[in-house]
Amino acid sequence: MLGQPTQSKLAAFNEIPVIDIGAAADPKSRPALVSEVVSVAERIGFMYVVGHGIGDEILAGVFDKSRDFFDLPDEEKRRIHITRSAQYRGYLGLLEKGDTDPTFKGNNLEAFHCAEELGRDHPDVISNAPLRGPNLWPPAPAHFRDIVYAYYERTFQVGITLLEILAEGLGQPPNFFTRHYRHHLAQLRLLRYAQIDDPKVELLARSHCDSGMITILSQDDTGGLQVLNKAGEWIAAPPIKGSYIINIGNTLQFWTSGRFSSTNHRVANRGGVPRFSIPFFMTPDYDTVVRPIGSEGDPAAPTFHVGREMAATYRRIWPSATM
């Protein structure tokens, strides 16, 4: 991706606000909600959202299945290893990494990846469209596929609502972003961070910004997520039951010329237990070409191709298909 524009409105915030998006369908309440969401996207780049319509039992169910899956023997999980998928779906083992960046050391986590489920008769599968295709599902635990994919579909709809709100806050039609989600690359990851009791290991995830549009995160009660403010202070984003944490990614910061903030964050090591989290990445269509809003008529404006950028990122950090 091209160099990121300067975050023009990032603030020295000291907490992550909670926003109830339950009023999104109410025409009378929506303008105030839009204003609130946009203000937080500018000043902080992170927010909790509640009122999203996904019940606690659904959130608890997908965490239960995540724990059950990662507790399987290694040989069972590796039957759906990511190297069996040209679309980077399936299981990723501890500290595994890609082949194009020798400086990347891997992460202290295991992961399961899935995206939009496409059957073999889908036109994108028939045409061999990049990063589009079937998921790899484990035969166990029981009902894993049904519960995890139902969560995927529900969370995607939350993402659509948020992107519509953000578009309106920029003075654009509600479908300004979502029109680029007909053949989207939105991805769900189940993560288990390794239990590391060594006090010398301070971080489970290094400081970074997400690459996509928005991330929709559900985290367990272990905690450790921290967000960097303009003053260089790390602000805690502790778990809040029933909430999602939403953050702006580099793609949306680029698209808005730095008006929305893709903010650095990390995960501190708490020790004692593994940490589970479930990030959902609202990535647009492979062929989406992003250019700063307002530069549509400028042939010299910077642009980047979403699919090629994502494919390069995946090759860098994850092992590619070998079969």
Image (cartoon, rainbow, N blue to C red):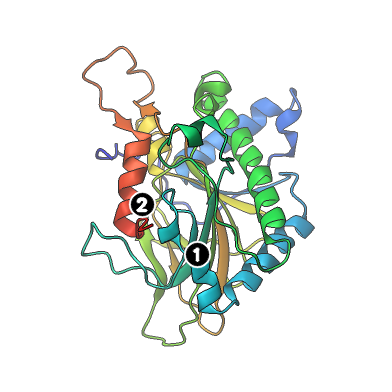
> What is the number of the mark on residue 173?
none
Side (left or right) of 240 relative to 200 = right
| Total marks placed | 2
Crowd class of label 2 (few under 14; some 14 to 19; many from 20; radius 10 Å): some
Which element carries disc 2, helix, strand or loop?
helix
Q: Residue at x 52, y 36 (%)?
A: 39
- Inspect the image, locate mark 2, and give the three-letter code of the amino acid beneath it: Tyr
Q: Quadrant of the N terminus?
A: top left
Mark 2 to mark 1: distance in Å? 14 Å
Compared with 7, 191 (above or below) is below
Mark 1, residue position: 111
Compared with 249, 90 (above or below) is below
Q: Residue at x 59, y 76 (%)?
A: 72
Q: Quadrant of the C terminus?
A: bottom left
Mark 2, residue position: 314
Crowd class of label 1 (few under 14; some 14 to 19; many from 20; radius 10 Å): many
Q: In which quarter of the image is residue 237?
A: bottom right
- Inspect the image, locate mark 1, and give the three-letter code of the amino acid beneath it: Ala
Q: Where is residue 82 in the image (x, y as percent from the top left)?
A: 44, 60
Q: Which residue is drawn at 47% across and 63% down?
A: 226
Compared with 239, 164 (above or below) is above
Residue closest to the eye, 32 or 140:
140
Evaluate if marks 2 and 1 touch, with contact meaning CB atoms under 8 Å apart: no
Q: Name the outermost residue toward the top.
A: 297
Q: Where is residue 286 in the image (x, y as percent from the top left)?
A: 41, 34
